[in-house]
Amino acid sequence: MYFNVYTDARDVVEGYLIPDGFSTKPLIMVKCGDNVFGPLGCDVFLDGPLKHGHHDTGIVGFRLSEENVPGVTDATILEISDADSRFVFYRRLAPEHITKRVFRLETQFAPHRELDNSFKSHFQFYASSAEQYGGETVRQMLEIINQPSSYVSGRVLLRSVHRYFTEDTIKITSLRDPFYEMAIRLVSVASYKKRPMSFVSERDAILFEPAMGYFADTSFDNPEKLRSKVLSAPKDVLSLFESPFTHQLVASSPTDKISREGVSSALDALSQFTIFDSSELDSGIAQSIGEFIGLDSAEISFSPVRSPFLELSEVLRDIKVLEHVLENDLILFHFIRKAEQRASAPFLQ
């Protein structure tokens, strides 16, 4: 999906929406104050989308005015969305919007939606769970123009998006104990067949299909049965859980295998982030973000590590084969902890 609003002169708003379907006729919904208009057809021809092969007719543009959206001129609330997905790709800038560009790299399999939701009303452009969209749509999110206030988050491969950052982009991420993350992934994957979760993308469902089948009947409240299940797991099933943090930071595709040498690249990637929390033991990241973007941390929600995943992580820690599965991430954390210890050590003259 491609989208943009290139003119908002208040009485006239112009832009385009190019849907994923090559022959699909784009439709938009418009929220203007308390009123909702649409679906409205995009009936303006644009040569570029046709010439570059993005759409078969090029009729993807729209022009909003008092004629088709009464009240648009004086509206303080104006939102334009794709009528099919309801994805909001434009909001009229408001005085309370934070005029900064923020990207948060989600690394937890079950995303911190409470954190993302805290920012929704504070930014003009807002998109969370970017991994649920195609690569071109994510690119559009990060390269959004004419919207100086933007917040985007997603569990995407860093190398697939880093080229779209500017020197003004505030980059945020956080990690947690690798065994805690594996606990989350195991429970989520094992439960998916019986209770599908919205945060599991179509690509994840395909990628983790072998693990979903194998762990579906796992008893997580019985340490011995869990241990036996993990030890009996086929190699290709366990490989799906290999060092997800290092992989996300340095891989170019979901199926890339990362060697131990990739850890140094992961450390370098983390050093480029504006705000980084390595443990999620408390809500410190909320305070750090609030201070940096000028938002009261009391308005930012964050859920630190918690039960029952803490207890399950300790059970997993005692299953030695998982040290090999998580080897790169464990090495990564070793160097992160050493760097933190050096940083906190008193300076000796």
Image (cartoon, helix red, strand yellow):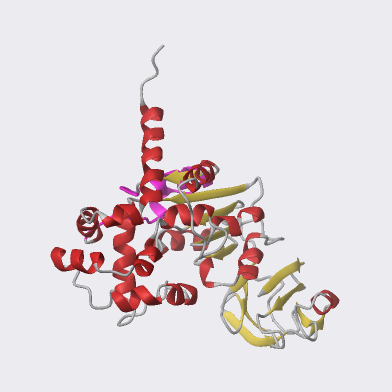
On the question of residue 92 being in view, the answer is no
Quarter occupied by residue 32: bottom right
Q: Where is residue 60 drawn, in percent x and y?
A: 75, 81
The structure residue drawn at horizontal position 51% and vertical position 65%, both measured from the top left corner, is: 255
Q: Where is residue 139 drawn, in percent x and y?
A: 65, 64
Left or right: residue 116 versus residue 94 is left
Image position of 125 with respect to 87: above or below:
above
Q: Where is residue 290 drawn, in percent x and y?
A: 46, 47
| Camera-nearest residue between 203 and 257 | 257
| Camera-nearest residue between 247 and 87 | 247
Indicate whether residue 285 is drawn in magenta.
yes
| Camera-nearest residue between 108 and 150 | 108
The structure residue drawn at horizontal position 41% and vertical position 47%, both measured from the top left corner, is: 285
Residue bounds of the magenta highlight: 280-307
Quarter occupied by residue 82: bottom right
Q: Quadrant of the C terminus?
A: top left
Q: Where is residue 101 drawn, in percent x and y?
A: 60, 53
